[in-house]
Image (cartoon, grey):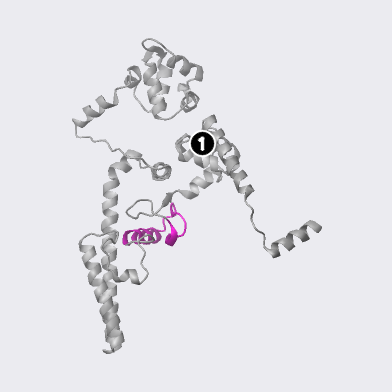
Amino acid sequence: MTTAIHPDALKHFRDRKRWTQEQLAEATKGKNKVSLPTIKRIESTKDGTYPANDRVAEGLAKALGVTLDELSKPPTDEAEREASLRQFGYRPLRTMLDAETAMAFNMVQHIYGIPIHSQIVMAPLFAALLAEGSLTWRRERVAEIEDAAARLMALGGGHFSFANSAYRAEDGASYEKRCIENRDLFGNDIWDDVYDLGYDPSQNNPFADFIKHFASKLDAKTVSFEGDWSTSSWKTSEGMPEYRIGADLISELTGEDPDAEYALLRGHARLKDIPADLLGSEKEVERIAWIIGRIPEDELAKRKTDRDELMSLIGDFDIPVSAENSDQAKEDDDA
């Protein structure tokens, strides 16, 4: 028995996964394993479809995550497909994600088993829950501040200095209440006096502070924030912190090799595609080589050229050596 495969459909779905023909061949498994020459032969078909045997067709469809029917017909025009889906209430989300964020989606899927599509669908819920959680946290802090101000007033016995401090705390709490009521997550309408006290919105904001607090309370070991919190840059213009999901796992898989990490970040190698027999510390060298091998040769060569050029430039810098280090170096040379 044979199944028709349209060459344009096979190439379209392979390109959608950003796979080479070799990578597609490697992705087919077991009894449905498809050789590289077969894939090349199918894609080189000039007219009509290629009559592949059922085993080959099933292997390709499974590897690409499509149906046999989709493989048998020319790829649907995206505009036509979008128009059809719109009739059923679907809307496209058009945005460009940086490599780290794209990797974060994959890490969440890998660690927790939540498919990327489900993460996107549930993102508004997660955002709303975090937002409401941050407001609740701030309300609790305001209540604590008001209690502390009342205790300070009582302990001060009406002394002006204590009373003044208590009044200022109460004023701040009152202003914070208004911000919370207005759902001002990022402190855009913050009390002016706090700037005189050293508040810097480029370094922290109420929502980012809550995320830090929430992560620490959960002891979320799979979540890390880039650099020292007080000096980390924002990931978004509103003030979301830079973060990484599964940083330890990425380091373990790549051995902190920059090219291997690059391959994962750029989607050349996917976590689920790493062969099971390459997992484990004893297979680190082979695993890293496999991951780096997913990078197209010309792209990898350019990375090496750029890296060599950078190292050459760094080598041209005249870095001063302290007298102490100079003396130590001389002693080492004499030895």
- 325 to 98, vertically: above or below: below
**227 drawn magenta:** yes
The residue positioned farthest toward the top in the image shown = 47
- Residue at mark 1: 276
Please state if 329 lies on the left or on the right of 283 as rendered: right
Q: Position of residue 82 (x, y in %)?
A: 25, 29
* Displayed quadrant of residue 93: top left
Q: Position of residue 222 (x, y in %)?
A: 44, 51
**22 drawn magenta:** no
Q: Residue at x 50, y 36 (%)?
A: 274
Tell me the quarter of the image containing the C terminus: bottom right
Q: Is residue 26 in view?
A: yes
Label 1, secondary structure: give it: helix
Viewer-proximal residue among 263 and 61: 263
Viewer-proximal residue among 185 and 1: 185
Q: Position of residue 29 (x, y in %)?
A: 47, 26
- 187 to 259, vertically: above or below: below
The region drawn magenta spans 206-232
* Displayed quadrant of residue 54: top left
Viewer-proximal residue among 305 and 247: 305
Tell me the quarter of the image containing the N terminus: top left
Please state if 93 lies on the left or on the right of 225 as rendered: left
